[in-house]
Image (spheres, helix red, strand yellow):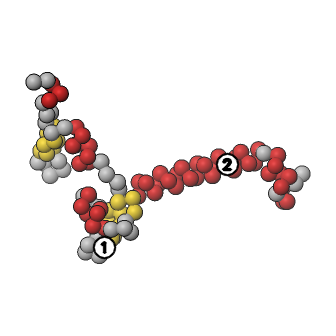
Amino acid sequence: MAAEEHAVEHAIEGADGHAQQYATGGEYIQHHLGFLVFGQKEDGHWGFAHSEQEAKDMGFWSINVDTMGISIVLGLIFLGLFKMVSKKSHIWHSWWPSERY
């Protein structure tokens, strides 16, 4: 058999000390890769989801914290960039009444 046909088993020790088996690296990534989700849990209190099922149970009003954080950071970068470019523009100074020279 070709080497590609053999499933490579990865033994990863979890936080509880038990080894988890993954047939491929893709399974490991799929298991551990997810969004940081904040929302209301089934018992009524608010907090971060600790599993994919818990994130699904939070429903529509849950927030993907990492996605929101990156969106805000990129938005601030672009606003700063646009402000910097507009300040250097001659049109800004001739259009804005308080900054006429």
Q: Residue furthest right?
A: 101
Q: Quadrant of residue 42?
A: bottom left
Q: Nearer the viewer, residue 55 or 45?
A: 55
Q: Indicate the position of residue 46 as horizontal and vertical percent values.
A: 33, 70
Secondary structure under tag 1 reads loop
On-image quarter of the N terminus? top left
Q: Which residue is mark 2?
A: 82
Q: Residue at x 28, y 63 (%)?
A: 56
Q: Is residue 46 above or below residue 98?
A: below
Q: Amino acid at mark 1?
A: His
Q: Earlier in the sequence, mark 1 or mark 2?
A: 1
Q: Which mark is residue 45?
A: 1
Left or right position of 23 against 48 = left
Left or right: residue 9 versus residue 101 is left
State the image coordinates of residue 52 (x, y, percent, origin top left).
Answer: 26, 57
Mark 1 to mark 2: distance in Å? 41 Å
Q: Of tags 1 and 2, which is closer to the observer? A: 2
